Structure formats: structure tokens, C-alpha cells
Image (cartoon, rainbow, N blue to C red):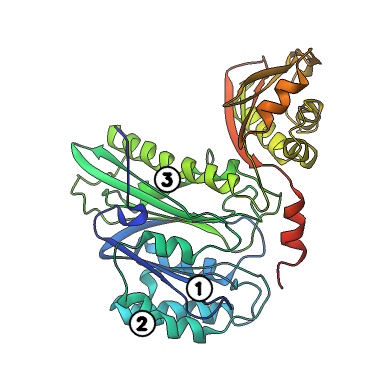
Amino acid sequence: MLKEIQGGICAAKGFTANGVHCGIRKNKTKRDLALIYTKTPATAAAVYTQNLVKGAPLTVTKNNIANGKAHAVICNSGNANTCNANGIEIAEKTCSLLAQALSIDPTDVVVASTGVIGQPLDITPIANGIPALVKGLGIHSDYACEGIMTTDTKPKEIAFEFSVGGKPCHIGGIAKGSGMIHPNMATMLVFVTTDCAISAKMLQKALSEDVKHSFNMVSVDGDTSTNDMVSVLANGEAGNEEIVCEGEEYTAFCEALAAVTQYLCRKIAGDGEGATKLLECKVRGAKDETTAKTVAKSVICSSLFKAAMFGADANWGRVLCAIGYAGADVDVNKVDVAFRSVKGTLEVCQNGAGIPFSEEKAKEILSESEIEVLITLGNGDGKAVAWGCDLTYDYVKINGDYRT
């Protein structure tokens, strides 16, 4: 049974974390360098952005954890190590400096970076910040969470306790993501830790399958970022028998991982740049899961629909429009649409045509901070969920002067 607990990435046994201001950001009150560490060797898995322009840290991380092992994660924010001529050198030097401070191998480091793309990045502040970063290691998931944030307005962290083979295990995660969020994997930075013992092969399998239903179903603005990833470290300190194949234990781990990732999906979508509302599109009755996913993502990505949600306008025609151009096998004459929030449920479309509804009630329902878009396709058992946010004036303001 899953139980939500405190501690974030430090909820799992053996993991410590920290975050400091090293000088990349001009604002000295903001942490811009984060560290996650386990003294016990951990199995490691990761997924990366599908953008052809990739930050140097992704290349270095992929090489480092090719053996499925890691001890630490280090990430800077404020200036992305992307499109820099010496990017690989900086990423490798970061690993080397951290390894020296922790007495580990440089190849046992997951390195990440986020912030403005294309700006020169100097290794000096990172090098100067590592001693304090290591010295301050402790139960500081919140410090690490702050250290990876860019335009995020809220920290994003969660942890759960679960059982594998009768042994209590723990899993926690932190995330950053507010803009440049769009499928496919990965479109944000997410770091997950667990004390569950699981082989690198099965850990990678679990993560690769999970993102199909979690982070690949999130979109804020349609821009797939260049330097983001999701990584998981599992140090086995819970003492369960190592998971090496599919079965009851593997299923339990996957359910716990999904609880973490889907929680973070909602937090990322709800904190989209300038956003005032979390939009959760639930599709059912599709021909198959692929069709359901295609429809859900098309609706959540529609700029017109997102703008309507900002204005609390029950413009269901924009939902059908997005379904119509999604490229999915859908009979539009069978589509039903409804909106739901804590204020109630409002049916607005049946069998592809509008039905009478109260505009006053619609305004009340759609003025809430979390809105569900319920779509029934009437053509099978396929279902899917996608997460997004409304499109506001502030999104343009934030991105109009992002570098300055």
C-alpha cells in the first residue's frame, strides 16, 4: 500500500541532498547549484529530451551511467550548458570536481544544467560552490529542489512509502519545469531516489515505460527543451531482495514510481509559465490507448483552447477542433465533452453537437484553479490522461524578456 510521507528525495534511506548559491544567478538569495548523494552505490536509469539540440550534460550523463551505476547528481540552474563550444569540457569538469570532493569516480555522476540557452557558462562559480555544496549535505531535499528551479514559482517534491517482499521501501522525487514543456521525453528536470533494490535493467525498463503515461503526457507551451532529463537512483538500502524480473515486486515498484511521476506531472503543468489553472484532459472510449493519447495531447496543446480556459469560457468547439486535427481515428459524431471542477460537472457536447447549458454555471466551474476536460469518444476501451495549463498574458511577458 502506498503512503505519502515527508522528505522528498531524502525520504529514501542513505540519500542526502543540498543546494547553494554559487554565483551563476545574479540574485544571491536564489540557490543555483544542487546535489543529491548516496554513499551506497546506486543503480541508475535516465531518459532524455528528444530535441536534436541537446545540452552537453546529457551526453556526459549518458556515457557515465552506461554501466547502470551512480553515486551522485549535480545540477546548476540559471544558465544552461547548451550550445557552448566547451560544453562537454565543463560537464566533465563538474563531474571531476564533485568526484574529488566526494571521493567517488567521476563517471559515477549524473550531471544536469538548466536556464538560458546559448549563453557562455563559466566553470568558476560551480567549482567555487562545490565545497560548500558537499559540506552542507543533509536532509535538505527542499534546498536541492530550489537549486534546480528557473521560472518555477513553486517547489515540486513528493515521497511515498511502499512495500516490496514485505520490506518497507521509500521513493521520492523533485522536479523543475515551467516553460519549454512538451512531449516527448524529457521536457523538464526530474530526479527520483529510492532505497528499493532493483537491477539497472529493470529500473530502466520501469522508467522508460512510466514516462509514456506521465511526462510524455505533459505540455505547457509546445516547446521541447534541449537539456532536460529524468533520472532515477536506487541504492537498495531498504534490504529487499533485488528486483531482477517482472512480477509482483516489480509491479509494486512501478506503482510507486507512477505515484511520484504523476504527482510531479500535475505540479509541473499547474505551474506553467504565467499559468493560473491546471488542465487535466481525460479521454475514454477510444479505439485504443494510442488514439486516446493522441486526442488528449492535441486538446491540451491547443493554444485556442488554453486561452479559452484562461477566460473561463466554455468554448467546447475548440475541444472538438483539436480532436479533429489530431490525426486520430475518431468518429466525431460520437464525441461527448464535459468540464468538471470542485464546483461541479457541466456537459456541453453530446454526439458531436452542442447541448444547452448555463453560461453562469460554466463560468463558476471554469473559474477554479483545477479543471478536468472529460472526453468520451464512444469507439472502444482506450483511455489516457494528459496535463497542461491555460495560456495567459503573463506567458508572453515572461518569455518576452527571458534573457534580461
Which is closer to the viewer, label 3 or label 1?
Answer: 1
Residue 222, numbered label: none
Of pointers 1 and 2, the one earlier in the residue sequence: 1
Report, in whole angstroms, how far the alpha carbon at label 3 lies from the one at label 1.
39 Å
Residue 259, percent from left and from top: 41, 39
Of residues 217 and 372, the one drawn nearer to the viewer in this rendering = 372
Report, in whole angstroms, how far the alpha carbon at label 3 lies from the one at label 2.
35 Å
Q: Is residue 228 above or below residue 331?
A: below
Give the residue displayed 61% in from the left and 37% down from the top: 369
Of pointers 3 and 1, the one earlier in the residue sequence: 1
Q: Is residue 257 left or right of residue 187?
A: left
Which is closer to the viewer, label 1 or label 2?
Answer: 1
Q: Residues within 10 Å of mark 2 (few under 14, many from 20)?
A: some
Residue 205, numbered label: 3
Secondary element type, mark 3: helix
Which is closer to the viewer, label 3 or label 2?
Answer: 2
Q: Residues within 10 Å of mark 3 (few under 14, many from 20)?
A: some
The residue that mark 2 highlights is 131
Tag 3–tag 1 contact (CB < 8 Å): no
Give the residue displayed 36% in from the left and 50% down from the top: 172
The residue that mark 1 highlights is 29
Give the residue displayed 45% in from the left and 84% down from the top: 127
Of pointers 3 and 2, the one earlier in the residue sequence: 2
Q: Is residue 203 visible?
A: yes
Picture quadrant where residue 117 is located: bottom right
Picture quarter with the C terminus: bottom right
Q: Is residue 220 left or right of residue 313?
A: left
Q: Is residue 21 above or below residue 317?
A: below
Of residues 53 and 176, the one drawn nearer to the viewer in this rendering = 176
Q: Is residue 329 visible?
A: no
Tag 1–tag 2 contact (CB < 8 Å): no
